[in-house]
Image (tube, rainbow, N blue to C red):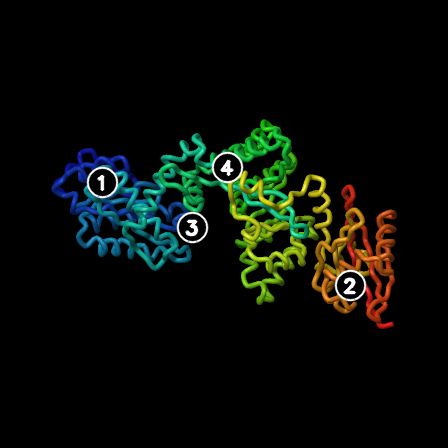
Amino acid sequence: MSDHSKDFEQIDELTGLSTFTSFRVLAQDILDDPTIRNDIAFVYFNVENFRSYNEKYGFAAGNDCLRLIGQTIQAIFPQEICSRVATDHFCIVADKNEIEEKIKQVCEELRPFRMETHMQLHAGIYFPTPDDFECTLCMDKAKIACDSLKHQYDSMFGYYDAKLDDEYQRTRYIIEHFDAAIENGYIYAWFQPLVRSFTGEISGYEALARWIDPDLGFISPADFVPVLEKYHIIRKLDLAVTQYVCNVQKKVMESGGQIMPVSINLSQQDFMGDDIVSEIDEIVLESGIPPEYINIEITESIFSIDSDRVANIIDAFRLQGYEVWMDDFGSGYSSLNSMQKYTFDCLKLDMKFLAGFSHSRNSKIIIESVIGMTKQLGIRTIAEGVESEEEAEYLRQVGCDQIQGFLYSKPGSFDEVYNLDIPKENTGLRKYHEKIGTINLLSQDPLGKEDDATKKIKFPMALVEEHNGHLDILTHNESFTEYVSLLGFASVNEANDMLNSDSENSVSVRNYMKSALDNDRFEVCHYSRNGLRCTLQINFIANYRSRNAFLFLGLVAESE
């Protein structure tokens, strides 16, 4: 390729290689030459972790490193077109013969610079096909092959293959068709219900972006969301989903239906650009939906950006009346640290915690510790990915507020999910249930009163609701199950039946419940059963219309 004219060539001052502008002209010239195009390869180099090297040793040392790479490339590919296309990115068009050996020689020259920074030179290789007519697209494909090696410190080079081509074509399709998909309504929201753990009622929904394409059909969020994030257009998706959710809510409200809280997911990039709070708030206010019916979900990926900025945005959302939820709590390394810096209303637990919980003591300890911590902080919990009744029952017993998962419903269209045969709680019930949910059935101080003299006693506990004269044990801890067994009941359900009977003990308990309600204080009820003298502390918790909630504490069970 030495016969090719380089009259146009412009030189990069630092490395002595061609500039990117020159490279495109010269590379296109070669690609257009039918006598040699079948013998060439596009090679894209990237210096991984170069930024760390710069920060550790300074820009002068970094420039020396780049200069050496440029000189090495030029020495090993003396007759080829070589270019520095970005700060630490290089590209060449070369004869494909012995291309791997030459790339290895270039990469080996960088080894002395790795030191403590793990700096690594990777190369992607692409052989043009008869259908390739633009050199920039060939370079893009070589870059994709190079990018696929990220964090693979045992690999120097990789080829653009069929798998990468599928990903590349899918990425191009997503970028080129995204705007039209938004405008034509191919992208919209599906919904998945959240269920109150101790009532089984729907307490809200999560909105999930879905793309149903007229040509490709269902495009998975796992495919299009990373692409939109990579090309910094995810904000448009998040705003479109918010608009869709508000339109649906408005339609329900105008038809006289019951609107429910819906959570929307925001990306890290939403926190980096313009005023996302004002943009979301404008959409919500124009729809006439009260902010309390829109919850903001964020993941811990946002914690990698400026912490003060994140804290200010979270506070601004909450000041406007929105709740802010942390999604996938426990999936990364900064979850606990984030609890010190930011204020959340709810945590959604990464259900990897539940994997094998039935036979893993460690899993139970972690789940129960997190739920206990959140109740002390006044934060609610939601468990995602719940698929079995065994998981749901365990989460009820340990005090998880809400449950989400295939056990109740897969994500679906709003009409499908809204019309599920599951009762919905209204606004008043939601606030009532949230107050009940503050009780920590795992704690020795369930009411959160540090001066409570009983806090050092590990006792059975149950949340009991009285509704129109009927009593229901909503949820209870494991000690309560053992307690009622000690009293001679075959199950907690049988103990519940006793509370609704005309027995002397039932009448006595009901009278003390009424006294606790009337006086807004705890009452102590003494009774005998199964040869035992029993003491039950009854605490009034909350009420909503004809519903009253109580905490039962089984303090003593002694032989008569």
To which residue does mark 2 refer?
A: 456
Is disc 1 surrounded by few (<14), some (14 to 19) or many (20+) residues within 10 Å? some
**Left or right for 210, reference 197:** left
Disc 2 versus disc 4: distance between alpha carbons? Answer: 48 Å
Disc 1 versus disc 3: distance between alpha carbons? Answer: 36 Å
To which residue does mark 1 refer?
A: 132
Helix, strand or loop at label 4? It is: helix
**Left or right for 416, reference 228:** right
Three-letter code, disc 3: Ser
Picture coordinates of residue 16, whole percent (x, y): 26, 42
Q: Earlier in the sequence, mark 1 or mark 2?
A: 1
Residue 386, by quadrant, is bottom right
Helix, strand or loop at label 3? It is: helix
Q: Earlier in the sequence, mark 4 or mark 1?
A: 1
Q: Nearer the viewer, mark 1 or mark 3?
A: 1
Label at residue 250 = none
CB contact under 8 Å: marks 2 and 3:
no
Label at residue 238 = 4
Picture coordinates of residue 506, whole percent (x, y): 83, 58
To which residue does mark 3 refer?
A: 52
Disc 3 versus disc 4: distance between alpha carbons? Answer: 32 Å
**Left or right for 421, reference 166:** right
Q: Earlier in the sequence, mark 1 or mark 3?
A: 3
